[in-house]
Amino acid sequence: MSQTSQPQERIRQGRALRKSAGRGSHKAIGNTKRDPIALLETSSKGRVERLIPLRYGRMLASPFAFYRGSAIVQAHDLAATPHTGISHQICGDCHLMNFGGFATPERNLVFDLSDFDETHPGPWEWDLKRLVASLTLCARHLGFKPGTADDIVAAAVNNYRDFMAKYAEMGALDLWYDKITLAGIFDKSQYAATRKVLARSMAKAQQRTHDNLLPKIGQKVDGRWMMTDAPPVLFHIHGGSTLFAADDDWMQIGHWESLANKLFNEYRTTLNSSHRQLLSYFKMQDLAFKVVGVGSVGTRCLVLLMTDDQDQPLFLQIKQAVKSVLAPYVPVGKSTFKHEGQRVVAGQRMMQATSDLFLGASTGPSGRHFYLRQLRDMKISAEVEVFDEFMLGRYALLCARTLARAHARAGGYAPEISGYIGKGAQFAEALVKYANGYADQVQKDFEAFRAACRTGRLMARSEEDFVADLYV
């Protein structure tokens, strides 16, 4: 599709796409004649074996938790749904918990997408469908009435529509510079409840710095900072609390410094010269394995602790990047990256308004791919468990606006998408039906998953169970 035409012509081109994929067709939930357990087992291949039960244990908490950890299942299902044919870089795992606040290099707090493990070229609708299904599942999880969930989803989709129309008229540089700051949201909010939540979140973010994290998870031993083992969440690979099998190739390396050097040396070359200079002021102190999230549990995720001459810390997260779950299923669009870490880094830089200055990629032992970024630098996530109907609705609007900006920025197709959606409610009505239909399907998949755990087809363990066995 040409991007050289005038905006009004491009809007007409987008409107014409309704002939091949009517807006009402997006209510279809896709091909659900599959075994969700087999798909989950596929996505678990190559993970640290002893941590796979912990992944399943976290997914057992609720249908909403299951949804967070089963992006591969929805990717499979979406492959059989109608699509507009507009393909560009998308998030790939755009549920509501993959948005959040964090600090820019200038130390301003912004709100944006925060997880790009599954980023890949694909239909823009897929991100929006994953978001609205997560909103409905979350509303059900919190016990809200069905009509409330429908209203939240419809309002979110219409907010995406309205902001996409705004971005369709915006110049390329203005769009690229557009940021959503928490201070800006606070200043413009007319609701006391929203301002109270934002004030609390911004105050928390100010405390979530590397300086404050170091004494919580580390201590100085013989002049060197070391992180304290707290398995299964944090442990040293080559220490007494390791959860790695003895025959794992990383165990053969023998010492954390060899592993860190292998990952770090290539990573440095992916940064620009000024950031390499900044990084040179820090020296490695320790390396540990850190379990994060739900869907990522079992993939190789490390924390590298470094300090400068003033003993000030820098924590780098080293996270394994595997093939996106979207890759086998997208109807149009292929990733140009052979290195999965580079795929994640490039996708994040395209979609985020501002990215971590330490964001880079590397190849580890045995050819595994990784990306690196700062750990927990003034990061905040939504506390959805305490949201009432009003706050979930406000948060949904913010996520939808953020996604519209990310799509407009990454693809440059804002006029076409805006033309396709139009000004009415038809597209939103279809996605409300999709969200309900897919939430029903997730409930069925969750029941099948729970049965598989009960019968022993899958092994699921809670964190408490893990800890009890470790300290017997």
Image (cartoon, helix red, strand yellow):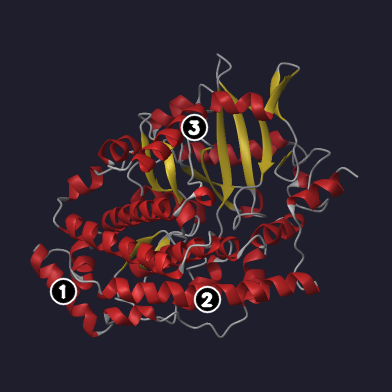
Residue type highlighted by circle 3:
Lys
Q: CA gap, disc 1 to disc 2?
A: 35 Å
x 23%, y 67%: residue:
417
Q: Quadrant of the C terminus?
A: top right
Residue 165 image point, x, y percent: 18, 60
Residue carrying label 3? 204
Residue type highlighted by circle 1:
Gln
* Secondary structure of the residue carrying numbered label 1: helix
Of mark 1 and mark 2, the one earlier in the sequence is: 1
Residue 425 image point, x, y percent: 24, 72
Q: Would you identify the image quadrant in which residue 222 lies?
A: top right
* Secondary structure of the residue carrying numbered label 3: helix
**Residue 294: mark:** none
x 75%, y 62%: residue:
460
Residue carrying label 1? 13
Residue type highlighted by circle 2:
Asp
In this picture, residue 145 sits left or right of residue 167 = right
Q: CA gap, disc 2 to disc 3?
A: 36 Å
* Residue 233 vertical position relative to residue 427 in the rendered view, above or below: above
Q: Quadrant of the N terminus?
A: bottom left
